[in-house]
Amino acid sequence: MESVKGHIVDVVRREIYDGELVIKDGIIAEVKRCELPESETPWPYIMPGFIDAHVHIESSMIVPHKFARIAVSHGTIGVIADPHEIGNVLGIAGIDYMIRSGKEARFNFLFGAPSCVPAVGGDIETCGAVIDAKDTETLMAREDIGFLGEMMNYPGVLNGDKEVMAKIRAALNNGKPVDGHAPGVTGQNRDRYGAAGITTDHECSTLDEGRACIRAGMYVIIREGSAAKDYKLLSPLINESPNMVMLCTDDCHPDDFVRGHINLIVKRALADGYELWDVLKAASVNAQKHYKQNWGLLQEGDPATFITVDNVTPYFRVESTWIRGEEVFNYNSCLPSHHDVEEHILDEDFPNNFVAAPITAADINLDLKPGDTVHVIHASDGSLLTDHDEVVLTGNPLFDSQYPWTGVQKIVVYNRYKPGAKPIVGLVRGFGIKEGAMASSVAHDCHNIVAVGSSDELIVKAINRIVQMQGGQVVVTNEEMLDIPLPIAGLMSPVNGHEIAFRTLCIQEKVRDIGCKMKSPFITMAFMCLPVIPDIKITDRHLMDTKTFTPIY
């Protein structure tokens, strides 16, 4: 028997009272109301832990059992994890790798089955694997798969695509929820999308979209990640519809992740004046209810999973995190919080799928001449959406200064899965690189190689370093090169979270040195390749008008 005393924040009864949790075999055996004795240090507040309701762990660039180490320090006790990224590289083998790694941590992982591998069918892009409706049916029957991941092919849903609908039926027939992804979809189309059995969406970026989503019976998962930040516009929903809101990071870069997680959104919501109980519903309760998980809400018979904080104001600090009766994080001590060791066998297992060969400057040549119509991707910091600039040339936008934009540069996407593939070259503005180039094998969602730079020579140098490492991130100048190897599927590193965060800070500082002032330049660049988000994107096969789903070339 073990007990924890403090001010119990009972989100079910919506009250705070002094009490004691009696813990036996990882379960709350009894919740006692009692008077707390005088103490030299203030008694903590005992609260349900936070849940990230939609996250791609791969975006943290660390494996799940090391992701958990960082998460618990921020009061996160569980995540709804869509292994979509590694699924696009390695298929079901990648999903299984994530599940095996997650089992090495005392933490709550609910993994789903990616619904869109590849994200878009046909000849639009090349990925490393295919998960079809038959595979999805097998996955949905598994006990270690809890939901169908975000259905990004919303045109397929609205058009009743046979393969898409079969995947949705496989989930529903097994009693498992289906996550959504339908940016900009409102009105009757939103109602039809929800009526197909899809019950969440994390892509709402306006209040009208969020309200339409809720009217259609869908949860809005408010996203505040490294690149996409929707809290400011969507937060009124916490007050309007507290039962239909969850919180997520979606894609959280390691340097952001070590600083904070869902706790930062909770603090912000409290500072904005939202009621504690509504905020905790969004942060702790609704995800457990929707995904049919009992991860603990401080009730008798619940798992003894909770956090302690020093106060319940916007300035709270997570003091400890408990998972199934074990204290896995304590602010004032160093705990052996997980069962893995630094050189665990999983860290020697680097599954990958990478066959690309080095390229030359001739492979990325663009023949531009006056009179040509060019299509320029306009990227913006803090947004996954892009504007589509269509201009008739009177000169070369890479060099001439008379155009109404500055900093137009080449963006290159290079297929890493198919021998002999040729790069696709486009134009992009918004990165502002002066003298240098950056490249990455993290390129949503197929994770081919993507690069942006100020000259062909430096772009080629950056791409070829990615090829040499078999995956990673790199920034180059004429004088130096910084890189981060990502040997696990070209997406993740075996090192711990703080180490990868430090390396990320170093490489992003070098990106700033070459002129790019974006907060998350690598994440922003990665989403230049995702053809399910408007208005214009580039894949390893085409420059795409993503509003009409048609290739420009």
Image: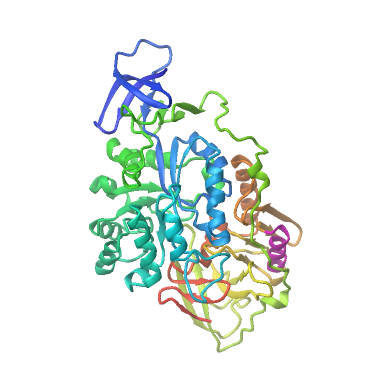
Q: Which residues are magenta?
A: 458-470
Which quarter of the picture shows residue 164? bottom left
* Residue 354 at x, y percent in the picture: 66, 63
Residue 275 in view in this figure: no
Q: How many marks?
A: 0
Looking at the image, which is closer to me, 192 or 539? 192
61 lies above or below 446: above
Position of 490 compared to 230: left or right? right
Looking at the image, which is closer to me, 247 or 172? 172
Which secondary structure class fits the magenta region best?
helix
* Residue 4 at x, y percent in the picture: 40, 20
Q: Specify the quadrant that holds the N terminus.
A: top left
* Residue found at x 44% / y 30%: 324
* Residue 405 at x, y percent in the picture: 52, 72
Q: Residue furthest right?
A: 479
229 lies above or below 544: above
Residue 432 in view in this figure: yes
Is residue 461 on the magenta stretch? yes
* Residue 65 at x, y percent in the picture: 55, 41
Q: How are the residues colored?
A: rainbow
Looking at the image, which is closer to me, 490 or 324? 324
Q: Residue furthest bottom?
A: 371
Is residue 319 on the magenta stretch? no
Which quarter of the picture shows residue 90? bottom right
* Residue found at x 65% / y 39%: 344
Q: Residue furthest top?
A: 38
* Residue found at x 28% / y 61%: 194
337 lies above or below 173: above
